[in-house]
Structure formats: C-alpha cells, structure tokens
Image: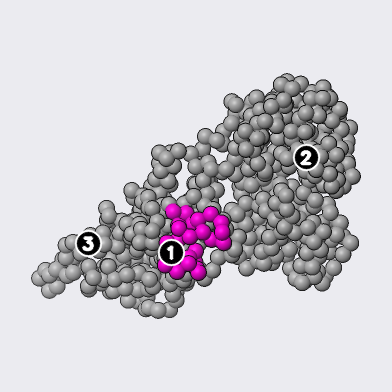
Amino acid sequence: MANFGHVYLIGAGPGDPGLLTLRGKDILEKADVVVYDRLVSPAILGFCNPKAKMVDVGKMPTHHKVKQSEINKLLVQFAKEYPQGVIARLKGGDPFVFGRGGEEALELVAAGVEFDVVPGITSAISVPAYAGIPVSHRGIATSFHIITGHEKEVDSRKSEVGSDSVILSEVRSTKSKDPSQNLSLDFENLAKCPGTLIFLMGIANMDFIAKRLIECGKDPKTPLAFIEKGTTPYQRTVMATLETAGETIVREKVTAPAITIMGGVVELGQALAWKKNLPLSGKRLVVTRAAKQASGITARLSALGAEVIETPMIETRVVEGSFNWADLANFDILAFTSTNGVESFFKQLFAAGYDVRVLAGKKIASVGKITEKKLLEYGIRCDYVPEDHTGEGLGKLLAALNPIPQSTEGATSHLTPRILLLQGNLADDTLLKLLPQATRWVVYETLPVAELPEWKREAVAGADAVVFASTSAVENFVKLMSQGTAGVPPYLKATNGSAPIPQTSFCIGRMTESAARKHGFNTVTSDETTMDSLVKKIVEFYTKNS
C-alpha cells in the first residue's frame, strides 16, 4: 500500500459551504486530485488546493457524465498515479447515504488502496432544517425515514418500520418506463408509518409514489413539501398535500435537485422558515479580491444569504531589498495607499530587524479607512486621511499641509514636509504629480492571475454580479473572461454556451467604478471606501430591485 496514494471519501454536505466539515476542508486544501460530483457547490470547490487536478464526474438526472463503475476505477487509477498523494473523492451530502460511497470503498479495498471516510451532512436532515421543517418534533413525529426515489439497477433493500427508527430504503429499477415497474418500495408499511417520510431524488416518480401511498391507506391530506436546491441561495420550498403532489410538481415546475418531505412537521415550516428572509438569498456573487483579503467580505455576504465565488484576479508579492532602511530618517510623512502596501512595508521592516519605534515622530497618512484600519492592526494611528478616499484626495490633502517650522541658530525657517509614498508597482503617477517632491518606494508588486479553471469560469458565468475592489482586478477579470471574444463586452458574451458573464458590478472607489464602466459593466459604487459600505450598498441594491 505504500506505493499508493490515500483516498478520502468526503461528504460535501447539501450545498452551503459553511456546512462542509473542518476535516473535509483540511483535506481539500492539500489534495493532489479532487474527483467531484455535479451537485458540489462552486464555493466548496474554491477550498481546493489551487494546484490540484480537478476531475468533474458530475451526473445529471437523466444522463451520467461518468458511469459509477468508471468512477470506481478512476479512484484506483489516481491512487496508483500519485504515490503518497492525497486523492479526494468529493460527493454531495454524505458518502454513505445513497451516495454509493460503499461501492467506491469496496473497489478500493479490492485494489489494496487505503481510504478514509469523511462523513458529510445529509440533505435529508439539513435541507428541511433550512426550510424551517424539523424532521422530528414532539407530539408530531417521533421517527423519520429516508427513502430514495431514484431509479437504480439494484435489488431492493428494505428494513422494518419501527416507531423510533431511521429507515433507509432503496428503489429497484428495470428498463421499463412505467414507474410501477421501476419501484419496489414497501408502500403498505410506508403508508402506515406515523413518522416523517423523506424522499431523496424522487421528483420524477413522486406522482406515482403519492398515488400508491394513498392507495395503501395514507391520508390524502398529508402535508408535503418539495424543497429545491436546499441550503443554497437558490433554495425554494413548494407546499402541497399527498393528493396534489403530481399536479403541484407540474404547475410549479419543480425540478431536481429536490427532496420531498411528508408529514405533520411540514406545517411547521410556515412559521419557522428563516433562510428565505435573508436579503441576498438567491444571489451568486463573484468576489475578485486577493485570496488573503477576500475572507472578510465573503463571510458577510454569505451570512446575508449569498453564494460567494472567491475568484482572485491579482496576486501580490513583497519587493525585498530595494531600499535602505536608514533613509527613513529623511522623511517626515509616510503615506500608505493600500493594505498590501501596509503589510509589505511592515513585513520587510520586521525582517530587517527593526520595529515600529523607527517611526517615532513621523506623521502617517492613509488613502482611506480600509488602509487606516490595517495600520491600526500594527499599532499605528493615522494623522491624515482624506474625506475623498482616492489617490487624488490624498495628494491634495498632503499638498495643502503647512510647511514644517524648523529652528536653526536662532532663526526659524519653514520646510516643505518630506513625504515617502509606499505603493505597489502598478500605482499610477497621480500622487507624484500632486506631490512632485515626494519619494516613492515600491514595496510590493501586483501580478495578474494567469488563468481560471474551467469549473470556476462556469461558476462565474452563472453569477448575478461581480465585486471589484481595484482597477487591476477589473482589467484582469475582463482579460480572463473575454479570452477568445476580442472586442466584445464581457457581459454580452456567453462562456462555452452558458449564461452570460454578470452585467452588474459592485465597486469600491471612483477609479474602480470608472474602469468597470469602460468595459461595459453597469456599476453600483459604495458611498465610502470600506467593506461595510460596500456590503450595505449590495443589500440596498437587491432589496430595492427585489
């Protein structure tokens, strides 16, 4: 076994990336290969090692992209190709709850490949919870029973119905198109069961299932709910009864992926539904900030109901050894124009053996509140922050400062403040034009992300809007997403036949807004250059247009 990689059968949960287990996330971050299913959220794929080989074996309801037998063999193949490697098999829900994880595990055992199972939160429980429906409730249901309505060419497996049991029943399939020939559920026992019935993957057969349950004695008025795309921003709950199940599916156009839950607990959903009230529910937003900066806004938008696709457009790298630290003594004001500049400056300062004491007596300027907040993390309070949080605003503020009085041999003279600009390699000359006597140190360089994996391009193409925090992010986003579409505004061009690239963009700052408009985006710009202001603007936009 030492010559094989280690396979992890990981449950991705029902869709919400927040419901992925910590162990699952840890494995994905270091995986060499990730074999994933169709229902795995793009936001969860975003946790994967960026250098990992990504293999889509996704299955559609009526078409298997890759057969299960081939998936089993693929796992063994990758284990052989990556000795000592980490192979992640990422499956929706839980691998062992109708996820066919057992079949994959048996294949690995037969080949002598070691594996771990990382359980996931099953949709059977989590999706109803997100719809405000508890699967059990005192006085209503003391048991719940999970049944798959998906057609499969396997023998029926059934357990006896007990008053406090969890039942896992499976459907048998034949080649017949007649549901009565495809399903071999024990309808008589299920009809008599007093607990909650939860059907996974059964929308196509639900009309037949409902009629059979009624024929076997189940109350036609039994409350029922179809929950589409559970725990994602696109979740939708459709209420019905057992006798109206079929017509409701047709009228409301209920489609997979969806689960069906039956029983008295369904009625609790009318009072307990909580997720549908979140202001960004149903929205997919692309955040283009650098990876280390994206987590803050991602968490805020996710908490408001959005699905966030982190898609960094730039990477930053410290420019080391390019200046003499002793020269700091020659400057009166240090001006920072970005959080990257702050982090890069102090990283190099500390690495050179200095600390913040070398800044004693100097004034500190920041282009805006976000950079000001970052300086405060290093114990540095700003002396100058312009009301207009732009390079032009900062330049005008510093240019208007009174000369510094200086006494020499009993006489007093006034000197223009000596200003040091701490910027990146892509900074324009706005500040230098306004402050011609200033000195610039390039403390970091910005590098554009060279490419996007196909799964992320598809996720971006299906998003509602994109969030920009810099002009460089705008420019590189357009470049990457418009490859092969020269001269065509990005929002007008579909990617690989999928939905168009988002037309709406949310921007921080006027320069970012200007860059986005230049490329044809409809822009919504935050009132202030802060993440709080941007998030507030996003919520206001969708609340107003809901």
Q: Which of marks 2 and 3 precedes in the sequence? A: 2
Local crowd size for mark 3, using a 10 Å CA cut-off: few (<14), some (14–19), many (≥20):
some
Which residue is at 32% across, 70% downward? 428
In the image, the segment drawn in magenta is 478-503
Residue 229 in the figure: left or right of residue 535: right
Residue at 69% from the left image edge and 27% from the top image edge: 244
Alpha-carbon distance for marks 2 and 1?
A: 45 Å
- Looking at the image, tell me whether mark 2 or mark 1 is earlier in sequence order: 2
Identify the secondary structure beneath mark 2.
loop
Point out the tag, 3 or 1, that comes first from the N-terminus: 3
In the picture as drawn, the residue positioned furthest to the left comes out as 411
Q: Which residue is mark 1?
A: 488
Measuring from the top left, give residue 223's x and y in whole percent: 69, 25
Q: Residue 32, image x and y in percent?
A: 69, 66
In-front residue for pair 93/424: 93
* Number of numbered discs overlaid on the protein picture: 3
Between the residue at mark 3 and the residue at mark 1, the CA separation in whole angstroms equals: 37 Å
Where is the C terminus found, in terms of image quarters?
Answer: top left
User: Is residue 136 in view?
Assistant: no
Q: CA distance from mark 3 to mark 2?
A: 68 Å
Residue holding disc 2? 149
Quarter of the image that includes the N terminus: bottom right
